[in-house]
Image (tube, rainbow, N blue to C red):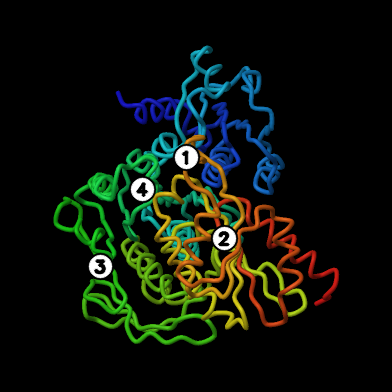
Amino acid sequence: MSAVTAVADLFHAATRVQGQEFRDVAVHMIGIGGSGMCGLAAMLMRRGARVSGTDQRPSILLARLNADGARISFTQEAGSIPPEAQIVVASAAVPDHHPELAEARRRGLTIYKYAQLLGALMEHYHGIAVSGTHGKSTTTAWLSFVLREAGLSPNFIIGADVEQLGGGSGAGDGPLFVAEACEYDRSFLNLHPKRAVILNVEEDHLDCYTDIQAIEEAFFEFARRVPHDGLLVLNAADPRSRSIAGRVSARVETFGVGCEADWRADELGLAGGSYAFDVSYRGTKLGRLRIGLSGRHNVANALAVIALANDCGVDWPTIQRALPEFRGARRRLELRGEPGGVRVVDDYAHHPTEIQATLVAARERYKPGRLWVVFQPHQHSRTRFLLDDFSRSFAAADFALVPDIYFVRDSERDREEVRAQDLVERIVARGGDALYIAEFADIVEHLAARVTEGDVVLTMGAGSIWKVADDLIRRLGEHRPA
């Protein structure tokens, strides 16, 4: 019996009490503050589980979980696991030698990674998994929003906070379960969805993959998990995604912007920072719509949402009405404030392709006098493996400020092999205007002394760089009331 099947059976024994799964199952979550873990915790609580968890520092998401009844601790030690805990769940970032894991083993508790528990949860539903190197959170949230607007009451777990959905997870009354499927550590291979999409396949997470071929193989294995009577949606414009078609048993549909595909977007028009386009399916024009999200890349994400929603039974008029109403997830080109006419925007982008797409979208949307980018590299290993790609990613910025690399999941050897200064030197060598400033407070002071009305400051990264955006707004507000 597999680990996923075992935990599914354990949960199954606790289901169907007043129609609510997982009632009274005690789940302890190590690293509960991660976006996916927070979402999973919230969904389990809505299904009746008793959730506890630990993390290193407080956050808004953890405060919300605590208010909803989760027991949160910021002391990560053996005694942090409640005596009644039945299952312990660890995030991907938790090392094997973690003291809580050691205690869970000593007590003989059932231990699972986040992705294993997510896979077990999906077993109860018609799963829809959204994968790809980029765009997963936005597409997962967008699809969940459209399905909810269509009255299908989906369950969902997203790796981001989404105001329109009430957070990063939701427990609906319907059979559909939409989940973000991450390729890190091959975690998406724990899922067996009925429907899935592969948005794109690129180099990333080279701390756990040897090369792009290994990444391609993992995505192919993920695609094979969709059954023959399911649907696999592939990006026709992405060669590695497209190559999977014909190698799987599932029904395949493709999407693409201005290229040969089942679902196509043509006649793109840009106005007010967002795109309008014609949508066609296998040569038949369905209609024109304008999306509320910025960036050409979100036209492609919209097509993926349309393909999946259509297969779930949502008709075109409903899609045409609901799709433009979605405003996006937090930290996706999010306007945080506009003190003194300086727009301060925050984004999660932390991969070279994401950075390039986001900078173009920022220029299209805000038309800045000058575009200042504060980029916090995420992981020393990612920075080292993709250093040349990163150095080419800031051509659309007028100025780039780079603090120290966000240290997570890396070894001390990784930390020694690359520094933020190395990235700055590469950017400058390519003709860019870049500066290394180690501390966030010094970055805020540097910007406050130089930005002027009409400028845009864009903070970017998967770490804690959003703090610079919030601190800068406060700093500018002291001297430049809006």
Q: Nearer the viewer, mark 2 or mark 1?
A: 1
Tell me the residue at 54%/24% (across/down): 98
In this rendered view, identify the residue nearer to me: 394 or 20: 394
Indicate which disc, 3 or 2, sits on the residue closer to the N terminus.
3
Q: Which residue is mark 1?
A: 414
- Relative to 313, residue 71 above or below: above
- Which SS class for mark 4? strand
Residue furthest out toward the left: 246
Tell me the residue at 49%/46% (across/down): 380
Residue 346 as seen in the image, left or right of residue 292: right
Indicate which disc, 2 or 1, sits on the residue closer to the N terminus.
2
- Which SS class for mark 1? helix
Mark 3 crowdedness (10 Å alpha carbons): few <14, some 14-19, many ≥20 = many
Distance (Cα) linking label 2 and label 1:
19 Å
Distance (Cα) linking label 3 and label 4:
25 Å
- Relative to 347, residue 205 above or below: above
In this rendered view, identify the residue nearer to me: 305 or 56: 56
The answer to whether any part of residue 324 appears in the image is no
- Which SS class for mark 3? loop
Residue 400 is situated, as x and y percent measured from the top left of the image, at: 58, 67
Residue 62 as seen in the image, left or right of residue 215: right
Q: Which residue is mark 4?
A: 126
Tell me the residue at 49%/62% (across/down): 145
Indicate which disc, 3 or 4, sits on the residue closer to the N terminus.
4
Looking at the rendering, which quadrant does residue 48 occupy? top right
Looking at the rendering, which quadrant does residue 315 occupy? bottom left
Residue 152 is situated, as x and y percent measured from the top left of the image, at: 45, 58
Type of amino acid under label 2: Phe
Indicate which disc, 3 or 1, sits on the residue closer to the N terminus.
3
Type of amino acid under label 4: His
